[in-house]
Image (cartoon, rainbow, N blue to C red):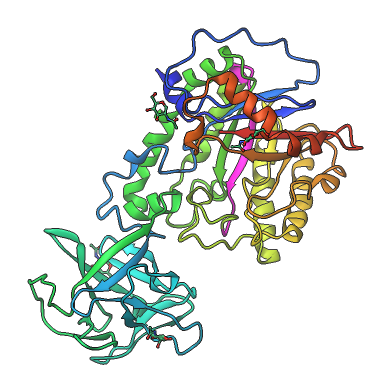
Amino acid sequence: MMSSRLLKRACLLLLVSSWLCSLSDAKRKTPPSPPPPPPPPSSSGLPVRAVCLGGWLVTEGWILPSLFDAIPNKDLLDGAQLQLKAVAAGAYLTAAGQDGAAAVVANRTQAAPSASETFKLWRINETTFNFRASSGRFVGAGSDGGAAVVAVAAAPGPSETFQVVRDDGDKSRVRIRAPNGHFLQVALGSNSVTTDYYGESTSWGDDDPSVFVVTKVLELQGEYQICNGYGTAKATPILRNHWSTYIVEDDFKFISASGLTAVRIPVGWWIASDPNPPAPYVGGSLQTLDNAFKWAEKYKLGVIIDLHAAPGSQNPWEHSSSRDGTQEWGTSDANIAETVQVIDFLASRYAKSPSLLAVELMNEPFAPRATLESLMKYYHDGYNAVRKYSSTAYVIMSNRLGPHDPTEFLQFANGFPRAVIDVHYYTVFNDLFNNLTVQQNIDFIKSNFSSELKKCHNTKWPSHLCGRMGG
Ligand SMILES: *[C@@H]1O[C@H](CO)[C@@H](O)[C@H](O)[C@H]1NC(C)=O
Ligand SMILES: *[C@@H]1O[C@H](CO)[C@@H](O)[C@H](O)[C@H]1NC(C)=O
Ligand SMILES: *[C@@H]1O[C@H](CO)[C@@H](O)[C@H](O)[C@H]1NC(C)=O
Ligand SMILES: *[C@@H]1O[C@H](CO)[C@@H](O)[C@H](O)[C@H]1NC(C)=O
């Protein structure tokens, strides 16, 4: 029962000592005929052929969207990017100013709003939100009737907290109640946004100065969104049920019987404070990881623990559990030290397991915001944290995504015995590959991705390993 489900979202991770590629089955429409017999393991245990168990302990909405279904106002989660057009004035709210005098006005009428007209949600509960402008500042309003609306606060408080009231007949129409209890309005012929629309109008007409039409231009569906969307109490049974049913012992049995040699398990930083992680995260995922190790030992699989979501988020995507797409990982020494502590915790807990194959220090740090300098400091310290407990586990250092030199970690990583560089190439998100056969996909990788990969191997460092994940 799991096989087609697993194959659908499978990503293969290979640790290779000579150039070798295989391809994910991610988009294969039908399950394969019986898997070929596994090749005899080499004495070094290489190559490793692993499948990534994504969407299990770190939520990625696209893998299992139904997990979000029972969240009230589930389209208004943390990090949703909204544009708000005042219908009567025909203008978008905009926070164009970058400085302390950042008035929120409604003077933009063009059809294609820009970043200044886009606000990120922070969800307080299903009806109450903060709005973050592209400057990073939060929209707020004083308590006077008609007070100015500005985007100046570095952190949200009561003055930055707004209630969203939706039109039941057309959910894209909203009124926004300001902290003073009155609704925002943009009077016809005015550019000003004021907090002085009194009363509880039930009209949602185009001539109503308090009505805004919402366009959502982006949303995130990660661990932060699911936990904060339900609220921790309601998210707890939902996630615990997901953890114990989405991947089960039979899956490990199947993976092993299929000739793979390892699993890669993405985890989030909050697992290190299980069972009482900080809000809004849910406790209990550590028990699931313990179970995974038991099953891996039983079916002779290696485990690659992959820190997929680092504190502060190392990339702007939902799978790093960013609240709103802001990427803060590595911007302070304290943050790097906190991340090393997570690695220390994981390495100390699992080093004695014969199944601990590797610790991946971080998934997909994104350049340029994740700097080479902060990553080298972290990879150095994270490597040493693993080595406190294990002399044999591989330590995986990820290449950056985004603009970067693909060889930037080669010389650095070579200084660490049993270090691996992880490079990611995706075909899964490109329709070009849908209709190719498996062999055509493999040929594509050999011809089109080879030059970068060869740089990992045609170097003066023969001991070097290079892992790749395709999906
Ligand atoms: C709109 O108002 C902002 C803030 O006062 C200002 O910076 C911007 O130039 C105005 N834009 C237009 C099109 O009037
Ligand atoms: C949401 O939060 C606001 C502000 O804390 C509170 O007044 C309101 O009652 C809450 N609503 C729900 C549905 O919990
Ligand atoms: C793949 O094949 C299907 C069926 O033949 C066709 O409808 C579709 O356009 C093809 N897609 C691409 C990306 O070539
Ligand atoms: C892949 O490589 C071939 C041969 O160099 C080239 O013709 C083709 O355009 C490449 N395809 C893509 C999608 O990069």
Residue drawn at x 36%, y 67% is: 112
Dividing the image into 4 quarters, which one contains the N terminus? top left
Residue 30 shows in the view:
yes
Q: Say above or below: 154 vs 350.
A: below
In the rendered image, which quarter is residue 104 located in?
Answer: bottom left
Q: Position of residue 185 (x, y in %)?
A: 22, 82
Left or right: 246 in relation to 147: right
Residue 394 shows in the view:
no
Residue drawn at x 42%, y 17% is: 30
Q: Position of residue 334 (x, y in %)?
A: 67, 64
Nearest the eye: 406 or 8 = 406
Judged from the image, the quadrant occupied by ligand 4 is top right
In the rendered image, which quarter is residue 35 located in?
Answer: top right
Q: Position of residue 160 (x, y in %)?
A: 36, 78
Q: How many marks?
A: 0
User: Which region is colored magenta?
Assistant: 297-312
Residue drawn at x 37%, y 78% is: 94
